[in-house]
Image: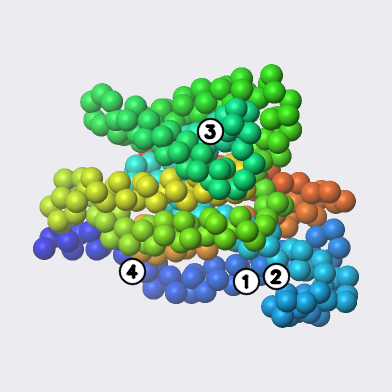
Amino acid sequence: MTLLTDARRRADGPRPAARRRPAFLIGVLIVVVVSIALSLALGSRPVSLAEVLEGITAWIGGRTPDEIGAIAVQERIPRTVLALLAGAALGLSGALMQAVTRNPIADPGILGVNTGAALFVVCGIAFLGITSAVEFLVLALIGGSLVAAFVYVVGSIGPGGSTPIKLALAGAATTAALSSLVSAVLLPRIAAMDVFRFWQVGGVGGAEWGTMAIVAPLLAVAAVAAFLSAPMLNALALGDEVAVGLGVNVTAGRLIASAAGVVLCAAVTALAGPIAFVGLMVPHVARLLFGPDQRWLLPVCALGGAALLTVSDTIGRLIGYPGEVEAGIVTAFVGAPILVIIARRTRMKAL
C-alpha cells in the first residue's frame, strides 16, 4: 500500500500544480487551434478570415472555390494536417523515450532512431531505387527499430545497466557513425543525393493525402499503445524494483512503450524527413507545466508537438518568401534556445 501511495503521489506532483492542470490543458488546446488558424491564413499570400472559411467549406463540399485566397487555403490544408500529425507523433515519441530510459535528454534524434531510418531510406534510394511512400515507410521502420535496439544494448553493457549517461553516449556515437555512412552512400551518387537532400532537411511541404492515409493507421495504433502504457511508465519512474513490487511487468511494459516510440518516430521520418528538437523540447515544457504524471504528460506532449511543428512550418513560409524555409530548420532555431533555458533552470540529471 505504501509503494502504491508513493507512486500516486509522485505521479500527481504537488497539489497546487495538479489543480492548475485543467487550466493549462485549456491553454494548450487554444494554442493548437491558433496554430491551425495561422497555418491556414499565413503564407506567401495572407488570406482573410472569410477566405479561410470559404476555403474550408469548399474543401468539405469537394468543390473548387472562386477566390484565390480560398484556393490557397485548400492547398494549405494537407500540409497543416501533416504538421499536426507529425508534430504530435514526435512529441509523444520523445516523451515515451525519456520515460522508458529515465533520461531527460533522450529523444528520437539523440538515440539514433532518425539517423537509422535515414540510412535505410538512403540505401533504398541508392541501391533499390525506391520511390513510393510504402517503401519509404517500411525501410524507415526497419532502420529506426534496429538502431534503437542496438543503442539500448550498447548502453546496457557494463555495471549499472542502461544508465542515462551511457544511453546518451551510445546514441551520440551511433548517430555520428551512421551519419558518416549516409554521406558515404550519397556522395558518389548524384541522383540519389538530389532525391534525399530535400527529404533530409525535414518538412511538411510535400504533404499528400494518399501517403498520410497509409501512415495514419500505424500512428493511431502506436499512440493508443503509448497512452495505455502511461500507468506503467509512472511506476517505472520509481525504479525497476519498485515497479515490480507494484505488479508491473517491467520488461513487457518497457518493450511496448519503446516500440510505440520507435514506430511513431520512424513513420514520421519516412513521411516528412528527420525533424529535430520536437521530441526533445516539448516533453520538458510539458513536464514543467503538468508535472511527471504520464497520464497527463503524454497527451499534452502530443498536443504541444502538433502546435510547435505547425507554427514552425508557418514561420518557415513567412521568412522564406517567396520560397520557404523547411520546418525542420525552424524547429532547431526555435527549440535550441528554449532548451538551453530549461536546462539552466532545472539542472535535471534523471527522471
**What distance separates the C-alpha of mark 1 from that of mark 3?**
36 Å
Q: Identify the disc placed on residue 15.
A: 4
Q: Nearer the viewer, mark 3 or mark 4?
A: 3
Residue 70 position by quadrant: bottom right
State if disc 2 and disc 1 touch (CB < 8 Å). yes
Q: Is residue 64 above or below residue 303?
A: below
**What distance separates the C-alpha of mark 2 from that of mark 3?**
36 Å
Q: Residue under circle 1? A: 33
Q: Residue under circle 3? A: 120
Left or right of 1 on screen, residue 81? right
Residue neighbourhood size for the residue with mark 4, other residues' Cα within 10 Å, grouped as few (<14), some (14–19), many (≥20) = few
In the rendered structure, which disc, 1 or 3, sits on the residue that comes first in sequence?
A: 1
Amino acid bearing label 2: Ala
Residue neighbourhood size for the residue with mark 1, other residues' Cα within 10 Å, grouped as few (<14), some (14–19), many (≥20) = few
Amino acid bearing label 3: Phe
Nearer-the-camera pick, 19 or 128: 128
**What distance separates the C-alpha of mark 4 from that of mark 2?**
34 Å
State if disc 3 and disc 1 touch (CB < 8 Å). no
Q: Position of residue 17 (x, y in %)?
A: 39, 67
Residue shown at the point (18%, 63%) measured from the top left: 5
